[in-house]
Image: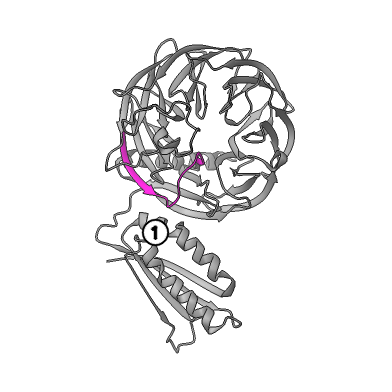
Amino acid sequence: MNCIKKVVLAIVLVSSQIGLAQVSEELMLYRKDFKSISGNNTVSVTSYEKGGNHYVFAGGVGNIDVYCLSKEGILTPISNHELYRKEGPARGMVADNINGTDYLFVANKHGNVIETFKILNNGSLKRVALVEDTEETYLGTAITLEVIHMKKSSYLFIGGLEETPGLSSFKIQNDGKLTHVQPMRDDETIHTDGVIGMFTHKIKGKTFLYTSGFQDNGVSSFRVYENGRFKNINNISDNTTDRFLTGAYPVTGVTLGNNNYVIVGHRHHKYYKRGGFIKRPDFVYHGDGVSVFKVNNKGGLEPHFVLKDDDTTKLQGQTRIEVVSIHNNEAILAVGTRDDASIQLCKLNAEGILSPINYLETGFSIYYGLRSHTIEGSHFLIAGSFRFDLKKIATYKVSPKINREGKVLRHMVSLKYKEEATEEQVAEAIKAFVDLGKDIPEIADIEWGINDSAEGNSKGLTHCFTLTFNDEHAREIYLFHKAHLDLVSQIGPIIADVLVLDYWTD
């Protein structure tokens, strides 16, 4: 890249960051694309830049899908790869560079293994190593992975939901193979029973790891040393006053000015209906909220602030928290929720106060599969769902909110049926489309008609359906609603062509 191009790119990046920071109170999510996946569902999502290209890895039950992500947020499928024993889901995934080689590390949850894939030049994958679970490694039902780079070596930390839970560190060799360094078995003090979230802070030359304990309802901090070994620093449990850690789930962190923060979400145990899954069924539900902890000078965590869920937020069942951007001592965060089926945008200021911005109801629950990615100053979120009937992955752009006040959204679907489709099939298809209004209350109005134009520019399309939505949320809920997906599956075989147009109007 020549000097002029570098200067122009720098100006674009700075301008974009400043613009995003200035309008942080009015940021919103706008869907840019969605694509089908080859597997049954999308549980985990990560992304990576290699050779100037941006790749998305979507892990589900049995396989991983690879996509290229454009600067407009458009996904292009590249390849798909089977997991070990066709198990999974690929719950924990992290991509990183180890001494010049790009790898994707995958926690195969029910395969009880950690798989290492080399990321090839076109973004596709090649498995190069595999580590199976033992009594000492705590890889069974592995869920969360965290790569930590030290001065001379890199290490992979692994946690999960084993019957005998704990935390393990492995040294990552240059060829992607893993060498076990240290296990730490869970006990009544530390919170590593069900490690679903991890985050690393490097502070004044020291490295600290923070974990969530889903089953023991708390968070723990650890000091990590140059040789990959680690020791516990402090532990904080759930209470009913200044933190929400029952079912501690996602963990992330930011540094703002001289302050280091760790942000922890939770999917409360009240949301789990499966008998026997929750080890401590005597919990008390005291609401939902995101907890902010401040890191002290010893690397330990101190309760600092809680953003409590209310009627204006979507924080029930948090499963992923992603840092969208950091600028001018302000961080923009995205909270993915399984039970509210939404993505909530929040702002964290330098004082560690977390406040809500806007949310988008996605129409599907976020189950760990949420990833923030930036391309040339544009901020995107990539989301997937564990729903087996959805089989989609979607991208959203984080940008200033568009004023839709007083407007409604028209969703026009024009189509033609195949010549071999019978009159009965067409009638059934029309009725099924109109009946969506009964099954999806977010549809404010629906009407349809048969083309009556004689201008000769109808492209052969014969039937037009017009749906009205009152806001962005309603369109998303409709698009990914089971009734709509069932309709597409039902009438798809007799559709010859379709044209979809959306527009906002008074």
Asked if residue 205 is positioned above or below residue 457 in the image, the reply reads: above
Q: Quadrant of residue 491?
A: bottom right
Res 372 visible = no
- The x, y position of residue 343, in whole percent, is 40, 44
For label 1, the SS is helix
Q: Is residue 175 above or below residue 465?
A: above
Whether residue 344 sits left or right of residue 118 in the image: it is left
Quadrant assignment, res 106: top right
Q: Is residue 202 left or right of residue 116?
A: left
Q: Is residue 137 magenta?
A: no
Q: Quadrant of residue 118?
A: top right
Give me the residue at 40% from left, 56% from top: 477
For this rendering, which residue is in front, 392 or 7? 392
Residue at (44%, 83%) from the top-left corner? 451
Can residue 61 be seen from the camera position used here?
A: yes
Report the label total.
1
Is 110 situated left or right of 283 in this image?
right
| Residue under label 1 | 475
Quarter holding the C terminus? bottom left
Furthest toward the bottom, the residue is 454
Residue in view at x 42 percent, y 36 percent: 325
Q: Which residues are magenta?
A: 354-371
Position in image of residue 372 (x %, y %): 48, 39
* For residue 5, above or below residue 152: below
Q: Quadrant of the N terminus?
A: top right
Hey, which residue is sitting farthest front in the picture?
Answer: 275
Q: Amino acid at mark 1?
A: Arg
Front-most of 169 and 491? 491
